[in-house]
Image (cartoon, rainbow, N blue to C red):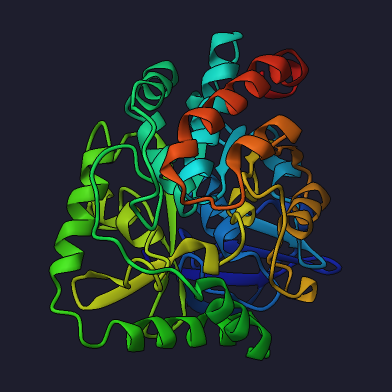
Amino acid sequence: MAIQVHIFRGSGRIFGFTGTDAGGKNLPAQYGPWTAFKSLTMYPDEPQRGVDVNACLADIEAHGFHLTDAHRPITHLVTGKMPGRERALVLGGGGSTGNAWLIGVIAGLFDAGLDVTQADLIIGTSAGSTVAAQISAAQPTELLASILAVAPQSRTSPVESDRGRVPNTPLAGHLEITSGIINAAVDAADMRRRMGAAALEMDAESDGSRQTQWRATVAARLPSQHWPQQNVLITAVDAHTGQPVVFDRHSGVDLVDAVAASTANGFGVPPYSIDDSQYIDGGYRADVNADLAAGYERVLVLSPLGGRTRKPLDWGLHLAAQADELRARGSRVETIFPDNNSLNALGVDLMDLSRRPAAARGGYDQGMALAEQFTEFWR
C-alpha cells in the first residue's frame, strides 16, 4: 500500500520521515529543529535514494515516524525495543528437497523445545514460501510426518511437492538459460527484466491450462488456504516489468496465488498470472530476501542452498551481503545451512522427489542438534 511520506531535515545529517503529521510535530524534539524538506509517495519494496523504504514504512506504521542519521536508521534510539519486531524467520528456496529439509530443521528444533514458527515475521522465497504458509497453519511435526509417510517416488515435478502433481516439464537447459541471462545482465534490475521477458517468451503459446493445474498443486500442499494473522511475506517478481513484489495478507491476493507466484521459476513452471500481471520466482528478487527483515532484533535464516549464489557479488543479492547489512543496522543474524549429511541427502537434483524423506530426516537431525545452541539467541 502506498503511503504519502513527509521528510524533514534535523540536526547534522539527521532526517525525519512521517506519514501522520505533515508539519512534523510528532518528530522527536531532541533531533530538531526540523525543517520541511519534501513529500513523496513511498511504495513497499520500491527503492528510494538514501532510505530503506521497507524499514521506513514499518517504523511509520509502528511509531508514526522514521529517523536516519547519514542514511542509517536510528528510530530505535528513541523508541527502544519495538513490540512485534523482535524475531524474524527467513526461509530460502531450494526446490523439492530443500522444502523437505526446511521442514525437517524446523520440526527438529520444535521437538527439541525451540519453536521458531512463532516468529513475529516469516519471509518465504520460492520453496521457502511454501514452508512459510505450511508452518503458519500446521505443526512442524505433522508436516514432517506427511513427508516421511510418502513412499519414495521418482522425480515427477519441476518444483517441490508433497501433494499434487503438475505435468512433466523438461528442465534440461534451465540452469544454462538462467545463467546466460545473469551473465548478460548489467545489474540486478536488468537481470530481472531479462528473466521475466525470457520466461514470458517461453510461455507465449500456452493455453493457460498449466496455470490451473499449478494452482491446484500448490493449494493441495497448504494446510490452509487463508492468510494467517501472523506477519508472513511472500516474494515474487513481476515478469513484465522486472519489479520485485512482496505479498502479504493486505495485498488483496489469495495465499495460494502468492505461493504459486513465488514458486514459478519461469522455465519449468511458467509465469503465474494474478489479475492482469504475471509473476516469476521470488529468488530473482534476491537469493533469500533477508533484507526484508530490516528492523527486527533477531533474524534466523534457513537456506537449503547454504548461502550460495550465481549472481555477481557486487549486486548485493546474496545472503552474506544482506546479513552484513542487517548486522550493521543493529540486528543479530544467525544462519542454518545443510551439514554434510544433509547435503548428501539433498543430492544434486533438488527437484528429485525420491530424496524428500532423506532430506527431511537430515534437516530434522540438524534441528535437534542445533536447538540448544540457538535457544538463547531466539528467546
Q: 174 left or right of 297?
A: left
- Residue appearing at x 69%, y 57% in the figure: 67
Q: In this rendering, is residue 334 above or below 16?
A: above
Q: Which residue is nearer to you in this view: 2 or 31? A: 2
User: What residue is rendered at 53% in x and 62% in y?
Assistant: 283
Q: Relative to 277, does residue 320 appear above or below in the rendering?
A: above
The C terminus sits in image quarter = top right
The answer to whether residue 2 is seen in the rendering is: no
Q: Can you give x and y, in whole percent of width and height, for residue 192 in the image?
A: 52, 80
Quarter of the figure that contains the N terminus: bottom left
Give the image quarter of residue 335. top right
Answer with left or right where residue 319 lies relative to residue 160: right
The spot of residue 275 in percent (x, y) is 18, 72
State whether residue 342 is above or below residue 6: above
Looking at the image, which residue is at 56% across and 48% down? Answer: 92
Q: Is residue 115 visible?
A: yes
Residue 104 in the image, given as x and y percentages of width and height:
53, 26
Front-lying residue, 270 or 44: 270
**Which residue is the extreme one toward the right?**
12
Residue 21 appears at what percent x and percent y?
48, 61
- Say if 141 sits above or below 363 in the image: above
Instruction: State the residue in front, 268 or 47.
Output: 268
- In the shown orientation, is residue 174 left or right of residue 365? left
Q: Residue at x 48, y 46 (%)?
A: 128
